Image (tube, rainbow, N blue to C red):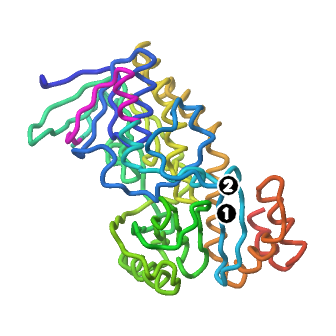
């Protein structure tokens, strides 16, 4: 491939948000180049592999062979393991399908390629090119060879670490309380229920939760996320997860066949996701749900908006931060209220005692909520444990 390169829209990172952005920019007529630093899209997997499903049609995704299990809902366990069941519609962005995440990511990249985007694998951005204060592309390296890629629009879809965003001058710092360290085993010979994704709350996972996502009969992803500010070392996640498994015979008898780990942001969205010539999308823009740590749906929804605006800006010769506000306004109208509300809820929930979690789940376990929202949850809890709702006065 000739060096140096030029394109209309340059997307850094071929995760779900990046591939979705590339697809929709290409569908809108732009010449698109999608860079991925790894040699294989979707690997290694850094995800519990659960997702909701109602948003797929909105962004043009057809369910495929990457689906392992379609679940009925979720079970939320308190520290004493009282349980509250909710259907998949109300269970949040992590419940609906359990998938093979590498297969899902590859399918989105295929969709981007079929729409006309060009992909470069094992190609890492190494810096941002600027002219007169505006981003005009990146420096990159492929198989040890350095070169430049110039584009009127650059999209940073390079994960919550987002070096590209920082290089461009957009602050992406994270507080310790806004990060989780995560570890997950894929386990066989376990007693999982393929009808439910399970979540265990409280001090079993300080500031986070233990999850069980069934992949098939006897096969499940068993993982944990713990808030970085509440542990002394990232290795503590393994200690907490192994302790939980040892206390549950249906999982203690299992066999680990895979292990993945990593970090995830649980912050509120970035206050700024655009500047001259650049936009941030997905995890790079802090679009991860602060309560669940899930970001696939949000990244794809924002990616569609981002791709459409990117094509319009590049082809219309208006790659200015003023024009790119169309993206900023669009994704915030669709996602920001829930993200910010869930960040506030996360800030409160991490301070609750195990006894309070027990009361909340106990109050909910006998109630059929027509709509799952903060008001209805607190109303149900107040009827049985009015003293508990006082702890949420500041949040409300």
Q: Is residue 169 visible?
A: no
Expressed as whole percent of the image width and height from the top left, the position of residue 109 reads 36, 34
Quadrant of the snapshot with the N terminus? top left
| Residue toward you, 252 or 161 | 252
Up-down relation of residue 392 to residue 106 (above or below): below
Among the 4 quarters of the image, the one containing residue 113: top left
Classed neighbour count for the residue bearing mark 1: other residues with Cα under 10 Å, few (<14), some (14–19), many (≥20): some
| Residue toward you, 225 or 72 | 72
Magenta residue check for 112: yes
Q: Are marks 2 and 1 in contact (CB under 8 Å)?
A: yes
Q: Residue at x 33, y 24 (%)?
A: 117
Expressed as whole percent of the image width and height from the top left, the position of residue 96 reads 60, 51
Boundaries of the magenta span: 108-124
Q: Residue at x 62, y 67 (%)?
A: 347
Please state if 332 lies on the left or on the right of 234 as rendered: right
Up-down relation of residue 307 to residue 66 (above or below): above
- The residue to which callout 2 is attached is 341
Q: Residue at x 50, y 23 (%)?
A: 323
Expressed as whole percent of the image width and height from the top left, the position of residue 360 reads 76, 74
Q: Is residue 143 visible?
A: yes
Q: Residue 345 has which mark?
A: 1
Local SS, label 1: helix
Among the 4 quarters of the image, the one containing residue 75: bottom right
Up-down relation of residue 331 to residue 85 (above or below): above
Expressed as whole percent of the image width and height from the top left, the position of residue 167 reads 31, 44
């Amino acid at each position: 491939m000739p060096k140096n390169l030029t394109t209309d829209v340059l997307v850094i990172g071929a995760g779900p948000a990046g591939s979705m952005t590339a697809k929709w920019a290409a569908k809108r007529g732009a010449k698109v180049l999608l860079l991925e630093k790894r040699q294989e899209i979707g690997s290694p997997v850094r995800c519990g592999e659960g997702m909701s499903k109602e948003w797929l049609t909105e962004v043009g995704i057809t369910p495929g062979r990457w689906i392992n299990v379609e679940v009925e809902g979720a079970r939320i366990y308190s520290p004493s393991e009282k349980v509250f069941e909710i259907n998949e519609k109300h269970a949040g962005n992590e419940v609906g399908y359990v998938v093979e995440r590498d297969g899902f990511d590859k399918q989105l990249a295929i969709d981007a390629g079929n729409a006309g985007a060009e992909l470069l694998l094992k190609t890492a951005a190494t810096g941002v090119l600027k002219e007169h204060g505006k981003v005009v592309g990146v420096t990159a390296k492929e198989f040890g060879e350095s070169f430049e890629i110039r584009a009127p629009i650059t999209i940073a879809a390079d994960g919550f670490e987002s070096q590209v965003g920082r290089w461009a001058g957009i602050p992406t710092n994270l507080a310790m309380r806004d990060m989780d360290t995560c570890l997950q085993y894929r386990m066989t010979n376990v007693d999982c229920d393929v009808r439910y994704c399970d979540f265990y709350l409280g001090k079993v996972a300080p500031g986070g939760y233990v999850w069980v996502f069934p992949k098939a009969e006897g096969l499940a992803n068993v993982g944990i996320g713990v808030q970085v500010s509440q542990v002394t070392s990232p290795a503590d996640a393994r200690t907490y997860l192994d302790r939980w498994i040892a206390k549950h015979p249906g999982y203690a008898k299992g066999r680990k066949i895979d292990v993945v780990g990593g970090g995830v942001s649980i912050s509120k969205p970035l206050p700024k996701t655009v500047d001259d010539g650049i936009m941030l999308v997905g995890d790079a823009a802090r679009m991860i749900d602060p309560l669940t740590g899930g970001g696939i749906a949000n990244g794809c929804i924002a990616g569609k908006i981002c791709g459409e605006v990117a094509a319009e800006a590049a082809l219309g010769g208006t790659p200015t931060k003023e024009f790119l506000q169309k993206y900023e306004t669009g994704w915030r109208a669709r996602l920001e209220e829930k993200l910010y509300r869930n960040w506030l809820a996360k800030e409160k929930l991490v301070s609750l005692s195990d006894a309070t979690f027990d009361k909340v789940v106990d109050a909910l376990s006998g109630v059929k909520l027509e709509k799952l929202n903060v008001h209805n949850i607190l109303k149900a809890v107040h009827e049985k444990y009015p003293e508990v709702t006082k702890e949420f006065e500041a949040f409300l």
